[in-house]
Image (tube, grey):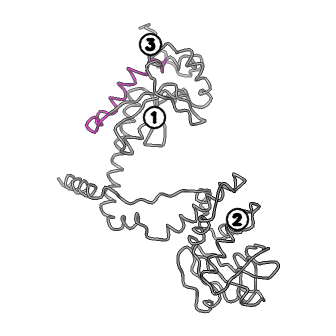
């Protein structure tokens, strides 16, 4: 009774919150190697784009920064022919980024912060450059707004990463960038900076979670139960077919002869049901690895087979690792999910099994290490029993 009350409460919660706020994150190469919060790498990337070979990128980065500097300080800094350096050493530490005009000495001193509080000797960084105060500006670059320490407030201004990137995006024209690699690196870097800025703020999605954490955690439990149920269905399918399940995703599962290492799979593609789009799923005869190269030969060999001719759905050949020989879509329903394994096996037997066995026979008949099971299937399909 308690479980039913909780389920009813969840249904009511979901009915009242049909438009749950979400924040879409675009991951780049720094996220993949888990270096998105490394200050040295971040500084090196800024320095690279500030001085790169592509004039459009270089100009956009420096103009965006100078515009913010001129807005936030009482100085009007200009750079005509500048040098960018990182980790410039002085007696008290290392300055993250220095941009210095080689003609009129105008200098930007940038302390780049991502995670840590500001304990750096900013005033010493300022004094390291023996030029007139009006020709230099200190910049405290941070993920979110941060007050400049009292002893440096007359020398440094605060600019956030997001402010700089936003100004860059206003000016950026990808059509003017010559090298595709620069486009990829720059897009990744912009996304990384945006992600970093979002993660430091209580965005709408995070706020919704904390406001409804108890209910959302209950929903997570129901997700676990749904995935557990579907995994059990996959194991039932495998057992009924006499094959082994393979695959790490709940959205699809291969069924194959693991003992004989046969790379002809029966595959169930279940993404729509798992993601709640609809109750449609697909069944596939899949050719994996080197076997995929035989798909044209097999299509020709079995072109008159009713189970090949009867499946007219468009085959998906996007992966370099597999080819679909046959694919067919079926529709279930919430009421039919209890019979999901039985329905899948029924469809396989009616629409795929004979062709599947013949394909295995065509490719592997003389290679099977333990072929008793397959010999019986070959006899059955060929009408020898």
**Regarding mark 2 in the picture, which secondary structure is present there?**
helix
Q: Give the range drawn in magenta.
A: 332-357
The residue sitting at 33% across, 64% down in the picture is 213
State whether the magenta stretch is mostly helix, strand or loop. Answer: helix
Residue located beneath label 1 in the image: 245
* Left or right for 28, reference 90: left
Crowding near the residue tagged with mark 1, few <14, some 14–19, many ≥20 C-alpha atoms within 10 Å: many
Crowding near the residue tagged with mark 2, few <14, some 14–19, many ≥20 C-alpha atoms within 10 Å: many
The C terminus is located in which quarter? top left
Residue located beneath label 2 in the image: 49
The image quarter containing residue 268 is top left
**Regarding mark 3 in the picture, which secondary structure is present there?**
helix
How far across and down, in percent of the image, does residue 153 sit?
60, 89
Return the mark for residue 381.
Answer: 3
Q: Tell which circle, 3 or 2, labels the residue nearer the N-terminal end.
A: 2
How far across and down, in percent of the image, does residue 285 sit?
49, 26
The residue sitting at 70% across, 53% down in the picture is 181
* Left or right for 8, reference 341: left
* Left or right for 134, reference 260: right
Q: Residue furthest left?
A: 1
- Separation of marks 3 and 1 at Cα, in angstroms: 23 Å
The foreground one among 260 and 81 is 81
- Separation of marks 1 and 2 at Cα, in angstroms: 48 Å
How far across and down, in percent of the image, does residue 20 sit?
35, 58
How far across and down, in percent of the image, does residue 338 sit?
28, 36
The residue sitting at 82% across, 79% down in the picture is 103
Q: Would residue 335 be counted in the magenta stretch? A: yes
Q: Would residue 38 be counted in the magenta stretch? A: no
């Amino acid at each position: 009774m308690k479980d039913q009350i909780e389920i009813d409460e969840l249904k009511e919660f979901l009915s009242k919150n049909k438009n749950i706020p979400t924040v879409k994150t675009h991951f780049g190469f720094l996220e993949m190697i888990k270096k998105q919060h490394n200050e040295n790498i971040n500084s090196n990337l800024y320095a690279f784009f500030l001085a790169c070979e592509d004039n459009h990128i270089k100009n956009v980065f420096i103009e965006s920064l100078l515009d913010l500097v001129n807005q936030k300080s009482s100085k009007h800094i200009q750079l005509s022919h500048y040098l960018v350096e990182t980790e410039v050493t002085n007696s008290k530490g290392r300055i993250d980024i220095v941009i210095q005009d080689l003609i009129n000495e105008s200098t930007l001193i940038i302390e780049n912060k991502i995670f840590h509080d500001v304990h750096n000797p900013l005033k010493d960084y300022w004094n390291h450059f023996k030029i007139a105060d009006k020709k230099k500006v200190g910049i405290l670059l941070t993920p979110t707004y941060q007050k400049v320490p009292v002893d440096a407030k007359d020398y440094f201004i605060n600019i956030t990463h997001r402010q700089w990137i936003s100004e860059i995006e206003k000016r950026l024209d990808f059509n003017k960038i010559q090298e595709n690699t620069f486009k990829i690196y720059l897009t990744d870097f912009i996304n990384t900076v945006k992600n970093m800025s979002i993660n430091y703020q209580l965005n709408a999605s995070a706020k919704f979670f904390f406001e409804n954490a108890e209910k959302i955690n209950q929903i997570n439990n129901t997700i676990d139960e749904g995935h557990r149920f579907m995994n059990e269905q996959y194991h039932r399918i495998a057992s009924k077919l006499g094959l082994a399940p393979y695959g790490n995703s709940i959205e699809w599962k291969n069924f194959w002869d693991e003992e004989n290492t046969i790379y002809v799979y029966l595959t169930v593609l279940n993404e729509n049901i798992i993601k709640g789009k609809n109750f449609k799923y697909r069944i596939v005869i899949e050719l994996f690895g080197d076997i995929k190269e035989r798909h044209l030969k097999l299509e020709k060999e079995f072109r008159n087979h009713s189970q090949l001719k009867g499946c007219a759905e468009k085959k998906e050949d996007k992966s370099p690792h597999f080819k679909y020989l046959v694919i067919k879509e079926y529709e279930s329903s919430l009421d039919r999910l209890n019979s999901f394994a039985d329905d899948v096996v029924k469809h396989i037997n009616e629409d795929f099994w004979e062709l599947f066995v013949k394909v295995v026979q065509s490719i592997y008949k003389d290679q099977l290490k333990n072929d008793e099971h397959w010999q019986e299937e070959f006899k059955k399909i060929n009408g020898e029993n």
